[in-house]
Image: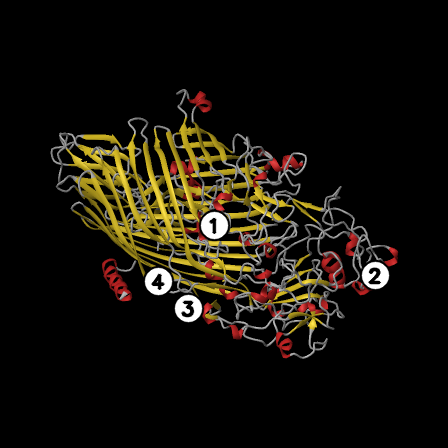
Amino acid sequence: MQKRLSLFIFLILMALVGAGSGQTTSGSISGNVVDQQGASVPNATIKITEEGKNYSLTATTDEDGRFVFAIVPPGTYTLTIEAAGFKKHEGKGVSLVANDKLALGVISLEVGAPSEVVNVTSDPTPIQADSGERSFAVEGEVVRNMGVKTRSFINLATLAPGVIAATSDGQTNDIQNISVNGVRQNSNNIQIDGITAVDTGNNGASSNIPLDSIGEFKLLTSTYQAEYGRSSGAQIIAVTRSGTDEFHGSFYYYRQHTGLNANTFSNNRAGLTRPISDQKQIGYTIGGPIYFPKFGDNGFGLWSGKKKLFFFWNQEWAPRTTPNSARNTRVPTALERAGDFSQTRNSSGVLAPYIRDWTTGLPCSSANTTGCFQDGGVLGRIPANRLNALGLKILSIYPMPNYTPSGTQNYNYVTQVSSTAKNRNDTIRLDYNVNENWRVNGRFLYNASTDTNPYTGLFGDSDMIAGNLGIWGLYRETPKYGVSTTVSGSLGPNMMLEVTYGFNKAKYNGTISDTAYTRTSMGLQNLPVLYNDAVVDDILSSFTFGSALGSTPNYRTQRAPQDYSYRTDNIAASLSKVWGNHVSKIGLNYEWGTKNQTNRVDQNAVINFGESVNNTYDTGNGFSNAAIGTFQEFRQATRGTTGIYKYFNFEPYIQDNWKITKKLTLDYGMRFSWLPPTKDTTGLASNFFLSDWRSGQAPRIFLPVCLNNLTTCSGVSLTSNYRAVDPAVLASGVPLTFSNTLLGSFVGRIVPGSGTLANGLSLSDAALVKDRGIHFSPRFGFAYDVTGKQNLIIRGGFAIFYDRAQGNLVYDFNQNLPTTFTSSVFNAVLSDITTNATSYGTPQSVKSIDPNAKTPTTNSYNIGIQYKLPFFDTVLDVSYVGSQSHHLPHNRPLNETPFGSAFLLANQDPTKAIQPTPNGSNALPTDFYRPYKGFAGISYTEFVENSNYNSLQISANRRFSKGLLMSMSYTLSRALGITSGDQGGSRIDGKDYINYGRLSFDRHHNLSINWVYDLPSITKNRFIGLATNGWQFSGIYRYTTGAPRQFTCGVNGVSAVNITGSSSGESNRCILVGDPFGIDAKTEFQQFNINAFQAPAVGNTGLETKRRALQISDPSINNFDLSLSKRFFIWEKLNIEARLDAFNALNHTQGSSINTGGTFTALGSTTLIANNAGSSTNLTGFGAINGWRPNRTLQWMLRFSF
């Protein structure tokens, strides 16, 4: 029945609109024409003409004097009204922003001859009288004259009420950092010229065009009309600039540089100089009519497009050098590279030349050095015949120390290398007036970006080409393209059609910044791996060195390179009809896309040389382990693969705007959203189905045993009695010997040939989630003009939105078995890699998603008033805005052991001493008693979470008029739920209410004020005026409550298994024994009462204390960004502007985060280890501010305009 109904609806709507996800950018203009006594004037001729483009539309008033232009491209128009017996009415400066429903209200005509003209100026700040949606326009005047730190128009969206930038300083250039009205950050949509511009992987912005290419944009935040969909959050609608019938252009240069900036608070305190920073934007714009040569009977001439064809062109280059924080690293010394560890210091900076020689079987420590290497009588020196050439070669690839540590410092290599990037943006737009009724525009965007980051990995993933040395890092190329074209026009006096087609495509190529970091170039071409064919581009493996020496070199190349690319196409068609008091629209939005994305597996291998008591050959630290060629773990995936992911959205809609009376307007409609799930067409993706898993097919795992009738044993040497046994051998009852058991290092590994590795997993080239069919998305809004004069409007609305969840939720399922298997070799030497354990894997972690998942849904509602203040041309809006979201994705750890299971006698390691009351320390490894045996963790994505949002939103807006623009927004809100992001989650065991609390984007107070003010001219004297006239002052003030942060309480040396009896659970969740906020005054070192907490006790699961009771806000944002500019008018249409932008202009030192992690002396204790913060002890300890927002940054600009 559902499918038949769906098909019927689609056929009807397709028959109505033809072919037709992008949404249109056009708005509407309406009004009522009356005479001076207030009587309606029917049959008046209404004409709107876009100023500078000569594009016009004509309509006629109905019997009630009402007129509507249903589809009008954004721009500035001149409105003319002509009626018999009345003077001609001409109103200039009617500004229509994208997707606006501009209600001009009552327009009164004066009696007189039509040849007489009455000129009026339009209302600069109109009230919203024809709809109930929450929407906010940002004019081009703001876009081009406001100092914007990120130089992104998206950042200006944060000035609207209900909008939170979930970043430390409240600034952003990407929609995935914005939460609007309590909806998750990856549920927003952005469209440029009617075309969706969203990365289908993370639902972030796919492109970020220059501010100088933006005409204006509009933000729809709640209960918007049925023509908008795809996402359940905000709709950010940008329109590129276009040319006019006169030539205009500019050249501009922006610069931020270290020499202009204040040093950071952290650097000042540490005695460090200002980090290198250099950012530029260099560009030009030009636009105007297009002329073509023509030849005819009169010879050569020019065809003029002054009334027909216009162009706009913007090109911008943006090279930048961005500072990073200083990195302190411990690299091998010259002695250590030669195998001499006699001068080696440990992570505490203490001399530790105690390098264990496993062949002696004797102890090696500061108390007893008989088992230590001491070649030639030098403690810590390894004999040459015991050194491993490959291991020494690995130590030699790192740079030599550049810093001499003092005291207890544990690092000898200091870097603070800035990130670099080069960005180029091209924007071209053409507008063509075909005739009086039809118009065509087309736009092309190109963005070429390359960047190098010495520390941070691709997309912030620490396992994807990241490091801490500053010499190797991430290199990324990102070419992007965007095309759109729109045709709009009239099919009759009261019918308009608009059709838009376009696409966006992008490619991300992420690889190592130094092409010499290969196996061959580094002289490590003979370094063994398990799967030679898996290694990509000869890239060298990653190496880690444990914690004994401190922060050792760490360059993560095991997942390089990473190649992502996508293309998204959109078609949108709408047909509008004005009939009586109705403006009806039907339309169809169709979006389809493909994304190729490399999976994130360790195909190039990673070797962990870190210290381990389970390694027979262990020497005590990672560098000396590498020197003799032993490691704790070698890990490599069988192969990396690239998924080809496809999806489409098909969303017809119908809506109507009904002017019931002159005071009451209803705005209602229905969107029919078909959002089939994304699928990997390669057939390499697999899903784990709980119902398909069979316990009898689970692989066996080697158990620990003691030989020779010993009750306890340990060690993994060749002669050790601690051994690994196949459970089948143990069950057979045969005597256990060295021949039918393996080294103890095989404990926990899978018995070859036992069971089914992919037990419960199924490959598929179809979607992993059920297609839920059509969703009915109703929209309703109203506007009631209380006085009938459009000065006091009651507005409200309700809507249900459906969200296309981000593709990243399914993009990694080609990492699952049987497509990819990650093998490990444990506690061995380098020569063992190719001969050891290729058939002895470990239980694999897999991903699973609920095949019956529902579509994320948000119910939005608002009610409020708009009041046109009788002064200052300002509109005041006071509204309640709320939302409830359902079926949100949540990652649940599915294969965790039950709480308390590590305390059960049945789960104790038989090779360790029996504890009368087990505390988890002697329990078997977790994999032995997981619910789904044969697997490690199972990350299960289910669409079950809910959230809610309630707010009071107040705004006051004055559009640019008479030299002044001003806007204020304030939001008092609460955003509450269980999980803040699509890929977040925790173990809740059915106790959702325990984790109910403030979401990561909850900000209780959010205030912003922005303004642009042209200072009055002081003199008319041209020469004096060069100094005194042409000044402009603009700025943004923000005050925002800090992000929520949770208190945690831990105990050194105690893991989750010792507290919860399981490997999971929030074992560090504090127990309250006092009031955390019970302090007289906050200081830098005490933001809360550190004596209000108790460490968890044995048996606590983290589900005893509600999360909301353990949350505190980070320090608030309190910031001024100010700009001062001066225009020098050379002659009438030529000027030069110089501007200085100061971000954090007052250089206000502001904390950004608080250390909320306390460490206690014992379980259940209220005694903290002495890590309390203080100016003479620990600057960033428990209770202290441990992060700081940027200090003052200056940017200067020079612009030449004509």
* Mark 3: few/some/many CA within 10 Å (<14, 14-19, 20+): some
**Badge 3 element:** loop
| In-image side of 1085 versus 672 (left or right) | right
* Mark 4: few/some/many CA within 10 Å (<14, 14-19, 20+): some
Counting residues from the N terminus, which is met first, the one under dot 2 or under dot 1? 2
Counting residues from the N terminus, which is met first, the one under dot 4 or under dot 1? 4
Q: Nearer the viewer, mark 2 or mark 1?
A: 1
Residue type, numbered disc 1: Asn
3 and 2 marks in contact (CB < 8 Å): no
Q: Which residue is mark 3?
A: 766
Give the Cα separation between the discs numbered 3 and 1.
Answer: 35 Å
Give the Cα separation between the discs numbered 4 and 3.
Answer: 14 Å
Q: Nearer the viewer, mark 4 or mark 1?
A: 1
Counting residues from the N terminus, which is met first, the one under dot 4 or under dot 3? 3
Where 1063 sits versus 578, above or below?
below
Task: Please state the horizontal and vertical placement of residue 1134, each as a whole percent of the image.
Answer: 41, 32
Counting residues from the N terminus, which is met first, the one under dot 3 or under dot 1? 3
Which quadrant of the figure contains the N terminus? Answer: bottom left
Q: Residue at x 19, y 31 (%)?
A: 117
Counting residues from the N terminus, which is met first, the one under dot 3 or under dot 2? 2
Tell me, for residue 670, which label it has, or none: none
**Badge 1 element:** helix
Q: Which residue is mark 1?
A: 995
Counting residues from the N terminus, which is met first, the one under dot 4 or under dot 2? 2
| In-image side of 902 versus 663 (left or right) | right
**Badge 4 element:** loop
Q: Which residue is mark 4?
A: 772
Q: Which residue is mark 2?
A: 383
Task: Please state the horizontal and vertical placement of residue 735, each as a whole percent of the image.
Answer: 70, 78
Can residue 167 be seen at all in this image of the molecule?
no
Residue type, numbered disc 2: Pro
